[in-house]
Image (cartoon, rainbow, N blue to C red):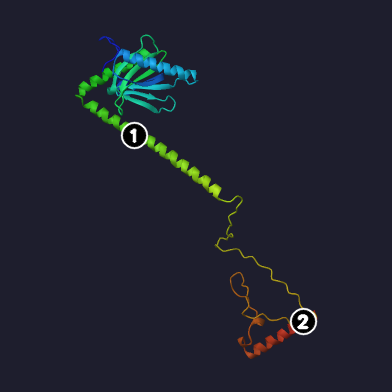
Amino acid sequence: MNRAFSRKKDKTWMHTPEALSKHYIPYNAKFLGSTEVEQPKGTEVVRDAVRKLKFARHIKKSEGQKTPKVELQISIYGVKILDPKTKEVQHNCQLHRISFCADDKTDKRIFTFICKDSESNKHLCYVFDSEKCAEEITLTIGQAFDLAYRKFLESGGKDVETRKQIAGLQKRIQELETENTELKNKVQDLENQLRITQVHASPAGSVTPKSPSTDIFDMVPFSPISPQSSTPTRNGTQPPPVPSRSAEIKRDLFGAEPFDPFSCGAGDFPPDIQSKLDEMQRQRWRGSKWD
């Protein structure tokens, strides 16, 4: 891997090997963007990319747009570019794909690196602005390269292949998480549309008829209906007609027909009992006549 910085053999690195191999070193910076370059390395290549992105950022700034802030996580596995608030990974630049890294000697706030994109296989130059840590970030990436190379020699090249497989799995997980989020949003939109359609379909002010309430025995409460009052005929000579058994008879609370001895037919009782019932009927009729 080519780097625009040089390191003396007796120079000590800024971080412990464990910090970069088992964890990562975080930095905050402003992200000017990335642009495609024709070559994977070269000082002039990154200078042209920096001029191009600075000009584009100047135009956006004149339109009121601010330079976005990002968080860089540097380790022996690569450089991750994240949103500082949500921690969402915007770019994951694997270390073995980074071919060039440099800080701008004319502008101490600017540092860059060139990385080969895993999908398009194009070389992209990433440009950052850090007021105080540009050189330190560049040196940290250099230390990550040095540790990764030593680990490569110790493992005989097997570790690189393992990292590639892990990187591929991590990328697939990110894609699945993105698809899952999009599907959740679509389901939520469909539920909202269905709810709105149901509200518009139901007529305004309509009340759904309710079934009568029941008691603890799941029975409809008894509601007596007042029978029609009949006015007795004072001047007539005919007694009130006796309702026939075929007429509709109201039932009591338990569903049984009320007993009325005067509504029974003549053949329903023995002769002696029937004669007494006839006498009682005549006496009731006379009483109602003289009232």
In the rendered image, the vertical position of residue 278 relative to residue 192, given as above or below: below
Q: Quadrant of residue 77?
A: top left
Q: Is residue 173 visible?
A: yes
Q: Is residue 14 visible?
A: no
Which residue corresponds to mark 2?
287
- The answer to whether mark 2 and mark 1 are in CB contact below 8 A is no
- Residue drawn 37% across the image and 24% down it: 81
Q: Nearer the viewer, residue 173 or 18?
A: 173
Q: Nearer the viewer, residue 88 or 17?
A: 88
- Residue drawn 27% across the image and 23% down it: 96
Mark 2 residue crowding within 10 angstroms, few (<14) / some (14–19) / many (20+): few
Q: For the view shown, which residue lies furthest in the bottom direction?
A: 271
Please, what is the three-letter code of the amino acid marked with disc 1? Ile
Which residue corresponds to mark 1?
173
**Residue 261 rendering spot, x and y as whole percentages:** 65, 81
Q: Which mark is residue 195?
A: none
Mark 1 residue crowding within 10 angstroms, few (<14) / some (14–19) / many (20+): few
**Residue 287 rendering spot, x and y as whole percentages:** 77, 81
Please, what is the three-letter code of the amino acid marked with disc 2? Gly
How far apart, in angstroms, are the residues tagged by discs 2 and 1?
100 Å
Left or right, 64 with respect to 101, comes to right
Left or right, 71 with respect to 251, comes to left
Secondary structure of the residue carrying numbered label 2:
helix
First-in-chain label (2 vs 1): 1
Q: Nearer the viewer, residue 179 or 38?
A: 38
Look at the image and tell me in which quarter the C terminus lies: bottom right
Q: Quadrant of residue 4?
A: top left
In the rendered image, the vertical position of residue 77 relative to residue 225, given as above or below: above
